Amino acid sequence: MMIPQFTFHIIILIIISLISPPLTYAQAEYEFIAQRDCASTCGTISIPFPFGMNEPHCYAHKWFEVECKLDNTSHIEKPYLKSLNLEVTLFDVNSALVEIMNPIYHSNCKKNNNNNNNKTVVINLKDSPFIYSQQYNTFLAVGCNNLAFLQSNGTTVGGCVSICEDNNNNFNLESRSCNGRYCCETSLPMHLAEYNATLQGLRKESSDHDECSYALIASDFWFSFDWSFMTDSEIEKMNNLKNMEYAPGILEWEILNEMFVNSTFQIPSDSVCYDSKRTSLTNRTTGRRCDCPSGYNGNPYVLGGCTVIQGFFNKNNRSKKWVIVGVSSSLGSIGFLIGLWLLHKDVKKRMIKKRKEKFFKRNGGLLLQKRMSSGEVNIDQTVLFTLKDLKKATDNFNKNRVLGKGGQGTVYKGMLVDGRIVAVKKFKVEGKVEEFINEFVILSQINNRNVVKLLGCCLETEIPLLVYEFIPNGNLFEYLHDRNEDIPMTWDMRLRIATEIAGALFYLHSIASQPIYHRDVKSTNILLDEKYRAKLADFGASRIISIEATHLTTVVQGTFGYLDPEYFHTSQFTEKSDVYSFGVVLAELLTGKKPITSVESGESQSLASYFVQCMEENRLFDIVDERVTKEGEKEHIVAGANLAYRCLEMNGRKRPTMKEVTLELEGIMRLNKKLNAQQNHEEIELAGIEESQPWDGYYASNSWPIVSSQTHSTNSEVTHILALK
């Protein structure tokens, strides 16, 4: 049975109007009631109890005390919540809401004389009966090429991206949309009690000619966020935000439990009250809310405040009503059930679509689309996964599937329907949008066997997800410092891993279509595959550099122990900063020591500085790992140590390039293989039938190698490498 589309929409409108009447700000049909002998208005605003003015018995608690102030501009009295010093434009006791004037955060508004640029007004609702309404507010940001972040208690809890190609942040009168072009919006978190907003430009360097940008929490009743029906006056209102300091926002409230302690305030017995959790962060009861009984309306917080709705209890009217309802229900029950089923299906589909779109925008999908259209992202090499696929792959992100946790998020092990094992990275959503997009864009362009491969991403979730190839043997830091005697870290393995990572960085710096600076080279970001080959990972902090650029000026970030001192002092990151970090990794491989260690005095010691000190004092073998000393040729170890020493030069210009580092390490590896082959040949001649069984293609001896005439020629090649220092 099919229902015509027009009839179906009529049914939807009727059902929605019955089960979910819209909340409006029209004054209720009852008279607002204050306590006896108490003022009930301030200017044009009615003030219902539990709010009140002047005398303590006129309000339920000091949090609900209202102060009436004369506005110097309009010469009209306006009500303020005295404890919070917030102007109130409407009180609603039925819905337990108040509309306040909320501050607007401005950035780069140098031409605006009515606002203090970057003015910060902190409103703290903690311990109060008020919170920002998640249902009736929206976080809105307007401006060109901005990342807008909503922060609470030092943590980013929301954000969105707005871009515009013409750098004109006047709202587009034709598009009538706020989906990331000129402006963006996102929902508020639950139980938001205090916040501030920050605006961060997407450009590398700000310009004096940049237009004003601003962010705010705005009431859905003051400003329509149904963009397809936005009126011209609302568009003009958005363009006028730059000249405003405050905009309406909605607070929800409740009567806190502690307000009944040692207080004369009592809720009338004829009211219907129930437990409330509006201000709770732990899902426990924090207060009470009240309504009038069925058939009554008015103020449930005042004795006698609930009055009978005229005609509600008239028996004749009620009988006629029930006859009509009964007949209608009998005749239309089948059609109603079918319509209800179709409505549920349609509404659920719309909700899922809207939710996915909201998460797509919040997670930087619009910015990602822009980069895709500009050719920055290699779409052919990546896949957009669905949340359903990744939930199935990770057993609904089971904690037993966690591979590791870091500053950017959590990594889970999963298996796709085609049998591929993957690693799924769930980002820490708030504030990490740019890192997520950055890693996706960079990895989509890289094709190198020693860089972890990106398979795709998922943007339709609350938290953005990236999907990588699975690397089974953990990271280099764990393998190097948590010794595994079953598969030991031999000198051959260390030399090979160093060469592979050097080659990967050489590829990023010099071979990729545009130079890429990794900016966080460290042993925890070097993964080991099933054959213990090295894979460079974690590109969230990486940057693509124009071919003409020599450095990147940015806020200093990195990992203590690996951070280039020159970058730390100048804030200018160059390719030589990655070289320094690689030098620390190479020193780790040679010494087996952690980048930061505690000494007997209780202070922390940097491996880089200690390694340089030992080299300058000719005490290299006091710090080199015992296994390296036993297995490696002395000249090879010295060559590797000299290379690490040059990488750790304080002056970046004196450090070698990653190309030079790679060539030198490959030279040492060739000499090492030649020496191992010679040793194997001599052992076979001595043992006759004995054969060496090298592990994974690399031989590690347990004693110092035999030196022959051929070895001396090999050492002359090492001397040539050392001469490169």
Image (cartoon, rainbow, N blue to C red):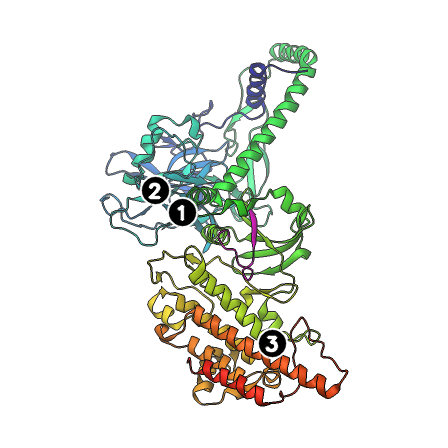
Q: Position of residue 703 (x, y in %)?
A: 65, 87
Given the image, on which type of amino acid does mark 3 rest? Asp
For image coordinates 53% across by 82% down, the residue present is: 636
Proximity of marks 3 and 1: CB atoms separated by less than 8 Å: no
Is 302 in front, or is 393? Answer: 393
Position of 308 with respect to 245 (left or right) is right
Q: Which range is magenta?
A: 444-457
Is 340 in front, or is 200? Answer: 200
* Dominant secondary structure, magenta: loop
Q: Name the residue under label 2.
A: 143
Given the image, on which type of amino acid does mark 1 rest? Ala
Total numbered circles = 3
Given the image, on which type of amino acid does mark 2 rest? Gly
Vertical placement of 592 versus 164: above or below? below
Density class for disc 1 (Cα within 10 Å; few <14, some 14-19, many ≥20) is many
Proximity of marks 1 and 2: CB atoms separated by less than 8 Å: yes
> Residue 452 lies in magenta, yes or no?
yes
Proximity of marks 2 and 3: CB atoms separated by less than 8 Å: no
Q: Which of marks 2 and 3 is nearer the N terminus?
A: 2
Mark 1 secondary-structure assignment: strand
